[in-house]
């Protein structure tokens, strides 16, 4: 019993990496949802294009220089995805995002609220710059 607790503690993710870890788990879920809906795959199967996108997205996420206290990639000032892959992941997010409300409602609503607050912050920054 004691050994199991030590093992569970060693897998604990540091607080500043929690958002990054959550995104690392959710991206494949969203791509799978998209692939099932758009490409007709079933179960754990993905088409070759979606497999490649999953591998690429997880690789880019692993190499992200902003892992600590990470926000969503769409908030980032630099975009590390190749243009074609960025277009594909945007399509996935547009299609799977609204459907996440049914399978991951807490994540979906948090994402909506974070997006709204981020856009408000940007508006304030633009307004402050124009007043200077």
Image (cartoon, rainbow, N blue to C red):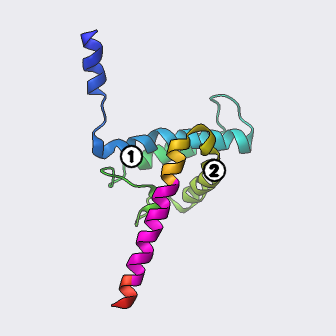
Q: Quadrant location of the N terminus?
A: top left
Q: Is residue 67 magenta?
A: no
The dot on residue 19 is 1
Q: Residue at x 50, y 41 (%)?
A: 26
Q: Main secondary structure of the magenta part?
A: helix
Q: Secondary structure at mark 2?
A: helix
Q: How many marks?
A: 2
Q: Quadrant location of the C terminus?
A: bottom left
In the figure, is residue 7 to the left or right of 82? left
- Image coords of residue 99 (percent x, y): 65, 45
The CA span between labels 1 and 2 is 19 Å
Q: Which residue is mark 2?
A: 98
Q: Is residue 116 magenta?
A: yes
State which tag comes first along the sequence, 1 or 2: 1
Looking at the image, can residue 34 be seen? yes
- Image coords of residue 122 (percent x, y): 42, 72
Q: Secondary structure at mark 1?
A: helix
The dot on residue 2 is none
- Image coords of residue 22 (percent x, y): 43, 41
Instruction: Relative to 20, say whether 65 is above or below.
Output: below
Q: Residues within 10 Å of mark 1 (few under 14, many from 20)?
A: some
In the figure, is residue 44 to the left or right of 38? left
Q: Are marks 1 and 2 in contact (CB under 8 Å)?
A: no
Q: Residue at x 72, y 42 (%)?
A: 37
């Amino acid at each position: 019993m004691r050994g199991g607790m030590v093992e569970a503690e060693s897998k604990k993710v540091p607080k500043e990496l929690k958002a990054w870890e959550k995104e690392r788990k959710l991206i494949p879920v969203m791509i799978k949802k998209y692939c099932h809906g758009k490409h007709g795959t079933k179960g754990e199967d993905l088409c070759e294009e979606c497999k490649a996108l999953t591998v690429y997205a997880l690789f880019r996420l692993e190499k992200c220089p902003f892992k600590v206290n990470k926000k969503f990639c769409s908030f980032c000032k630099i975009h590390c995805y190749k243009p074609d892959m960025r277009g594909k992941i945007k399509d996935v997010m547009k299609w799977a995002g609204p459907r996440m409300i049914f399978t991951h409602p807490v994540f979906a609503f948090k994402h909506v609220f974070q997006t709204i607050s981020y856009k408000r912050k940007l508006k304030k920054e633009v307004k402050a710059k124009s007043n200077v």
